[in-house]
Amino acid sequence: MATSTSLAAAAAHYNNPIVAGVAESVITVSPFYEFVPFVAIAGNTVTINRENALGAAAFAAIDATLGGAAGYNAGLTTAADTFALTSCIGQAEVDRFVSVTSASSGIDHMAIEVASKAKNIGQKWMEALVVDGASAPNPIGLPDQNLVEVSSGAAALSFALMDSTLDAVVSKNGTVDWIMMNSGQLSAYKALVRGTGGSYEYVTSPVTNRNILSYEGIPIFRNDYIGDVEATNLATTGGSDTSVYAGNFDDGSMKTGLCMLYPVGTPAGIDVRALGESHSTNADITRVIQYGTWCLANRKGAARLHSVTP
């Protein structure tokens, strides 16, 4: 398995200005894409034995009998989960009359359309991340990745609930890399901070230098595809309220957290094809594709605080 890299680095590695432009357009959708690691895999699926419980260990007296003692002998338990790559496709079709007249004004209309498709692809992945998409060809979102569940008890967001959610993310021994919520919960978090008389904390994104609101130094990413009423999106715990997510990014070991998988040999799964002239209209066609899927490599690498009141 290839070493993980960032979206920007993966695209730049191929020295293709079109691919680099598509990657930049995806990044503009959310600063989340500047942080999440991209991991190349061979083939179109990967199966990971995700840890359920560690092998047992216990303190022992001198000459203690160890045979048959579950406290010493119980082994590691895992669950095998398969993650399959899928395709997110956008096709730009630009009338040649529009292209010619735009070009005379110094405008590359096809480039504009391709960038627009790339942004839409980025939005589709952000939506897929927080929506139950267990049916192919949709990728499996966090609600159906068997992550740790933390219940709010149908309460409003609070620092205590956020702390409980962070405490449930243990794949990096207490370190948490990201928090995700919708705009309503982000406003609720701001109100909590203002209520203490404190000031906001920010982290800076590594590519576009955007200021991102943070909690205890952990960036809070906004994702408005997390609905205020999430009943249809909750695969493991039903409800009519919203959710807040927290988790780790994978460190390249495929054992610690969230990453985007993509096929080896492609720049972060991005494939841009100029298909040429349409056979039925006076237009040129360019196809923009990103092959990939979200993968939570460790079920304890993310947690969902559910049933949070809007």
Image: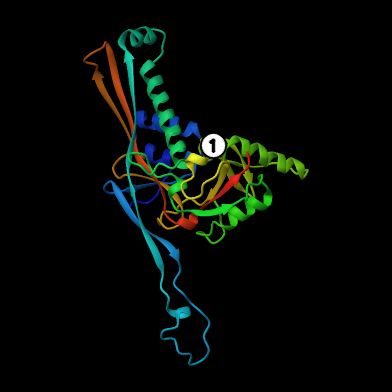
Task: Give x and y (percent) for residue 88.
Answer: 35, 34
The residue positioned 53% from the left and 82% from the top of the image is: 59
| Residue bearing mark 1 | 227
Kind of residue at disc 1: Gly
Figure check: 66 above or below 168: below
Q: Nearer the viewer, residue 180 or 218?
A: 180
Q: Toward which corner of the image does residue 21 lie, by quadrant? A: top left
Residue 251 shows in the view? yes
The residue positioned 44% from the left and 56% from the top of the image is: 298
Task: Give x and y (percent) for residue 277.
Answer: 24, 16
Task: Give x and y (percent) for residue 295.
Answer: 40, 49
Report the colour scheme: rainbow
Q: What is the tally of numbered marks visible in this picture?
A: 1
Q: Quadrant of the C terminus?
A: top right
Q: Is residue 277 left or right of residue 112?
A: left
The residue positioned 37% from the left and 10% from the top of the image is: 103
Task: Give x and y (percent) for residue 78.
Answer: 39, 64
Figure check: 103 above or below 62: above
Q: Secondary structure at mark 1?
A: loop
Figure check: 126 above or below 235: above
Label 1 Cα neighbours within 10 Å, binned few <14 / some 14-19 / many ≥20: many
Q: Nearer the viewer, residue 198 or 180?
A: 180
Q: Is residue 276 left or right of residue 240?
A: left
Q: Toward which corner of the image does residue 190 lie, by quadrant? A: top right
- Residue at the right extreme? 197
- Residue at the left extreme? 279
- Residue at the bottom extreme? 63
Residue 267 shows in the view? no
Q: Nearer the viewer, residue 234 or 114?
A: 234
